[in-house]
Image (cartoon, rainbow, N blue to C red):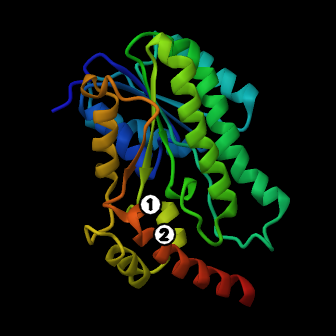
Amino acid sequence: MFDYQGKYVVVVGGTSGINLCIAKAFAVAGAHVAVASRNPEKVAAAVALLNEANPQGQHLGLSFDVRDLPALEQGFAVLAQSFPHIDVLVSGAAGNFPASAAKLSANGFKSVMDIDLLGSFQVLKQAYPMLKRPGASIIQISAPQAYIAMPMQIHVCAAKAGVDMLTRTLALEWGPEGIRINSLVPGPIAGTEGFNRLAPSAQLQQQVAESVPLKRNGEGEDLANAALFMASPMASYITGTILPVDGGWSLGGASAAMSQLGALAAKQESSK
């Protein structure tokens, strides 16, 4: 139902999980899609998937670490040789691991802040010259930790809260130029690395599903459909919005479920 023929889409962190589902959805909708991540092998595999999904598309793979500004600058310079501009940017690089505040090292805290917050800022700033046109859309992939305090997640809570404020602030600064920016907030999404780390067994994942008002964990396609809408002309008057795509999980179930998972992670941490 969405037509992105001839559009240029960039998905940073787009080689696995939710971001890869989003990249594939844009390719299926006709877009030329560039994906980027640190792992060259994953980048190559993602580009092969995009070529299969849309053989007529001009798909591109870039390998860089969002924390490494010179590498990021070089990556966008390569992108500019193939893409004349960016119609849609999906900024989804993220890092996560469970750790109590008392035992989390400064380097561990800094690592997540550098990937999620600093990395997001650097991606947006590098993409800005290619986005600076009416109708361009930025979609950030946030997390419920941005506004729901969760045990064992102080680093992620701080980083994702910052990511959402990037969204709000840039909606003010870049809106006059016609650039829209919104955040999508996934709930528990089955099959993703982050969800598997926080709920590492089928039993725990079923418990999480029971805490969701819609009584199921999400799928990558749920986020992909939301991204297709948010980047489309149908959402042309939506900017600065933080949109949960979580089956209602953030209405109450998230806090209880994450407290249980946090207690389990803390128990595992103390036994090491």
Q: Tell me where residue 269 sits by quadrant.
A: bottom right
Residue at the (25%, 34%) spot, across then down: 28
Secondary structure under the numbered disc 1 in the rendered image: loop
Q: Which residue is mark 2?
A: 196
Q: Is residue 45 visible?
A: yes
The residue depicted at 62 percent of the width and 59 percent of the height is: 96
* Residue located beneath label 1 in the image: 192
- Marks 1 and 2: in contact by CB < 8 Å? yes
- In this picture, residue 112 sits left or right of residue 209: right
Q: CA distance from mark 2 to mark 1?
A: 6 Å
Q: Nearer the viewer, residue 151 or 125?
A: 151
- Residue at 58%, 29% (x, y): give it: 169
Q: Does 43 sit left or right of 66 as displayed?
A: left
**Which quarter shows the C terminus?**
bottom right
In the displayed structure image, the side of residue 251 where residue 15 appears, left or right: right
Image location of residue 42, percent across then percent down: 51, 46
Q: Residue at x 69, y 58 (%)?
A: 155
Query: Which amino acid type corresponds to the residue marked 1 in the rendered image?
Result: Thr
